[in-house]
Amino acid sequence: MTNPKTFHVKSFGCQMNVYDGERMAELLAAQGMEAAEGGEADLVVLNTCHIRERAAEKVYSDIGRLGREDGTRPMIAVAGCVAQAEGAEIPRRAKTVDIVVGPQAYHRLPELVTLAATGAKAIDTDMPTLSKFGALPARRRTGASAFLTVQEGCDKFCTYCVVPYTRGAEVSRGWDAIVEEARALVDAGAREITLLGQNVNAWDDGEGRALHDLIAALDRLPGLERIRYTTSHPNDMREGLIRAHAEVEALMPYLHLPVQSGSDRVLKAMNRSHSRESYLRVIERVRAARPDIALSGDFIVGFPGETDAEFEETLEIVRAVNYAQAYSFKYSPRPGTPAAAMDKQVPAQVMDERLQRLQAAIWAGAQAFNQSTVGRSTRVLLERKGRKPGQLIGKSPWLQSVHVETQAAIGDVIDVDIISAGPNSVGGAERLRAAA
């Protein structure tokens, strides 16, 4: 097999995987390789997610589809969390896989590509103590909105979750490296930066500075208009971060704060280390600081032992919080996690019915929130083309997708009146500036 000249990176799952995929693409481009469409690339990188059930089986299915009609195939690399969890088992099951690289080792991808070109199987699932970020190239290209990883890993060990095993312990990137990367992203055209971490609000620099201090520093970067962060843990919502929502104009009025269940017994079984009441108190403090904030959450239905009454408690918390949006999933047993061995696994049919009811409640809340913004005037960051001629789609401060007809360009921030609402997006009309 020869050294590849073109590549394609396909990422699945969370925003951090999107960030990792972008960084892998930059690594390969720095080696002189060019991006190509998936079916034509000499190297295909499948950047995988391991959160949901049958994630590994889906990866093998994707691998099988990479063969070409003429009998040739690209060099295949499996990266990300499935790679970390499965390791050397992947090339044993799928002989066409040449490279397996975990999420803490992808900075070595160019070396692994060179090794694979010799015909050897290249595998690296180490979790080194030294940060991979220092080995990555400087940021040079981005869109109007960019992701920036500031924290990785998790020490919470929720009983259903594989992240501590695939991403490792919580590690915070250094202050200077983050600010430097943020500055490079702004210089490359980013108007908005979303700070990423498995528990992003646990970030600290080891010298007494926490996430709200970092946000304040980024707020001073010329050209950066918007700051967001995700995903947060309720136990790490410090007072300084809550105050930042009131004090930092560039920090958008949006908070994704997973709760997972409305039942204290289920939360304890999940090892979530917060209660229903403590979660609601955090929400009250955030709303007191920023009354117009949009709230988002995560929910799992059908966790082992969940009763009908406990599921009703989850519905109650959805209605109490009035989420602008939320993500909901059926419990999925992950091999090696404590919950997978728990008694009283909930039947699939029961989970299906509960998920439908939960999503109906979430949908109603999202519709109500979007409807409540009709009549507001706001600023919208334009990000991509819409389906109609002359239409662009952007993001409101509340992370709504806004459809608007405009002569402005992608990357512009324009004044918009919200004039219509659906459950998943809103319609806007550009406010034309008065002539000078």
Image (cartoon, rainbow, N blue to C red):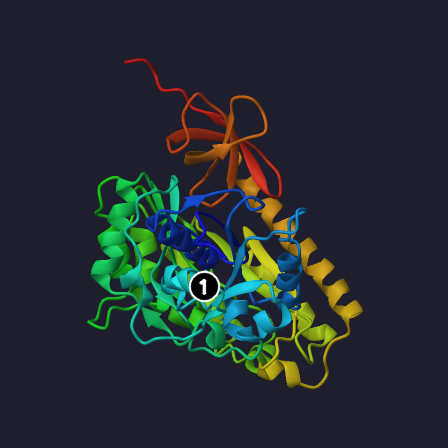
In which quarter of the view is residue 192 placed? top left
Query: Quick check: 234 left or right of 301?
Result: left
With respect to residue 162, does 3 lie above or below? Answer: above
**Residue at the limit of the structure toward the top, as seen here:** 435
Q: Could you tell me how many numbered marks the image carries?
A: 1
Percent x, y of residue 234:
44, 69
Left or right, residue 209 beside residue 50: left
Amino acid, disc 1:
Thr
Tag 1, which secondary structure? loop
Residue at horizontal 21 percent and vertical 71 percent from the top: 208
Write the residue at 64% across / 71% down: 93
The C terminus sits in image quarter: top left
**Where residue 263 appears, x then y in whole percent?**
61, 74
Residue at 57% over, 39% down:
425
Residue 251, given in percent of the width and then of the height, sits at 34, 49
Residue wearing tag 1: 118
